[in-house]
Amino acid sequence: MGKRILVLGGGVGGVVAAKRLAERLRGRVDAEITLISDTDYYLLPPLLVNIALGDLDPAQAQLPLSILSKRGVKVVKASVTKVDPDNRVVETSQGKFNYDYLIASLGVEHDFKSYNLGVGYHNFTLDGALKLREALRNFKGGSVVIFTPEPIYRCGVYPFEIVSQLDTIFRKRGIRDKVELTLIHPFERPIQPLGPEAVKITEETFAHKGIRYIGNARPLEVDDKNKVVVITADKVKYDLLIVVPPARLPKPFDGTPLAVDLPNGRWTVVDVYTGRSIKYDDVYLPGEHSMPSIGLPTAGVPVHFTALASAGAVAGELLGEPIDPAQITAMACAMDYGDFGLMFNCDIKLDLKDNKALWINNCYSILTSPLGKLIKDLFYKTWLQTTM
Ligand SMILES: Cc1cc2nc3c(=O)[nH]c(=O)nc-3n(C[C@H](O)[C@H](O)[C@H](O)COP(=O)(O)OP(=O)(O)OC[C@H]3O[C@@H](n4cnc5c(N)ncnc54)[C@H](O)[C@@H]3O)c2cc1C
């Protein structure tokens, strides 16, 4: 019997890993690749912003996972409920699946319960993006607050982008003078991990656009009755609240030996070079849920590279070839600030001894111009077409 490779998650990490495995193994080794996901389509999360802001329809942000079957990948629509690495079993709504190799990229859970965030709008799911689109269409003026209570959430640059993009949209609609825009965030200064150059550009942009930034915020809760966000020693009034939910470990990993309590939360822990679980040789976890454990941001770019490294390691082992050392060495970070964009590059040094990817203080600007916005837009729209 051939080797059974199970890929969990039909998002960035799962699709990238499945495709790379199929490319490397097909016709060379007896292996069956099965991808399990709870949707039968692949939706690129960055495009949820475009949906919420009304310039893309949901159908344009997704592709059917069945496209992967052309590459010999079997796709199963099922919800994963538990991963049992000791018995090499994955439990799902469609029954149990055994594996010889497991590659899991299940993203993160978005925590809307803490701080009463459930009362706000967001664009972290398709449903959320559609509701936000409606709210923005009906919005005629008032106080818009973007509330980010914790530092680990999906896509670190997102709050800085959305607040800037809203400024541009309200200007185009001719209502900017009727809108107050406020971003509440735990970083003392905006976009701080990208370094002083990014902070300076962002602070100048916020000053120019008239965006209020409340940094170093110690959040308490959203008081929806009085329509205020309560932070220590302050209350910020809102008419339209947009929330950025903290990221949490996906439930299928809860209570398994794959997850560990770390100072920055409970996350799956992997080897920074391959995305392999530090406890199980046959388990790879190149999903967002592993990024905080190796010092990388919870974003698609590091997940993409880690998934390539994981697929390369599994393929190398099955083919008896040296493992593909295609781990991340640099991270491009593109930001859309509404009327222009920023392209930053962060050089990444893998510290194999401490199992960390070092990038903070290694970021520099490549481009700040309207072209930067266009590049980001094209990058995501073409990424969707070319990844499968
Ligand atoms: C608004 C927004 C803007 C963003 N912008 C950027 C950006 O500019 N740059 C960037 O690098 N990143 C960006 N991201 C983040 C990026 O999309 C994620 O980091 C990336 O998708 C994570 O990859 P993943 O494979 O771990 O998770 P996902 O891509 O979310 O894939 C997880 C998959 O697993 C499935 N799944 C989850 N749980 C289960 C289960 N229990 N059973 C079965 N299937 C399950 C999901 O349906 C999904 O298909 C953005 C995200 C958002 C929301």
Image (spheres, rainbow, N blue to C red):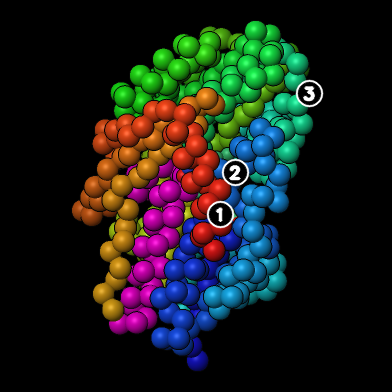
Helix, strand or loop status at disc 3: helix
Tell me: is circle 2 under 8 Å from ligand 1.
Answer: yes
Query: What's the residue at 54%, 20% (across, down)?
Result: 183
Q: Residue furthest front?
A: 371
Q: Which residue was labeled with disc 3?
A: 138
What span is in magenta?
293-320
**Real-space Cα distance between discs 1 and 2?**
10 Å
In terms of depth relative to the viewer, which is nearer, 296 or 41? 41
Q: Earlier in the sequence, mark 1 or mark 2?
A: 2
Q: What residue type is labelled 3?
A: Asn
Q: Which residue was labeled with disc 2?
A: 47
In the image, taking residue 131 as reference, residue 99 lies left or right, namely left
Q: Position of residue 89 (x, y in %)?
A: 55, 73
Tag 1 and tag 2, C-beta contact below 8 Å: yes
Q: Nearer the viewer, mark 1 or mark 3?
A: 1
Label 3: how many residues lie within 10 Å, few (<14), some (14-19) or many (20+)?
few
Q: Eyeballing the image, is 101 above or below 79? A: below
Q: Position of residue 142 (x, y in %)?
A: 70, 12
Q: Which residue was labeled with disc 1?
A: 384
Instruction: Tell me where residue 358 sits by quadrant.
Output: top left
Main SS, magenta region, reads helix
Q: Which amino acid does label 1 sit on?
A: Leu
Query: What's the residue at 69%, 13% (across, down)?
Result: 175
Q: Earlier in the sequence, mark 2 or mark 3?
A: 2
Instruction: Tell me where residue 246 sits by quadrant.
Output: top right
Instruction: Tell me where residue 46 sits by quadrant.
Output: top right
Q: Eyeballing the image, is 131 above or below 11? A: above
Q: Where is residue 77 in the image (x, y as percent from the top left)?
A: 68, 67
Q: Which amino acid does label 2 sit on?
A: Leu
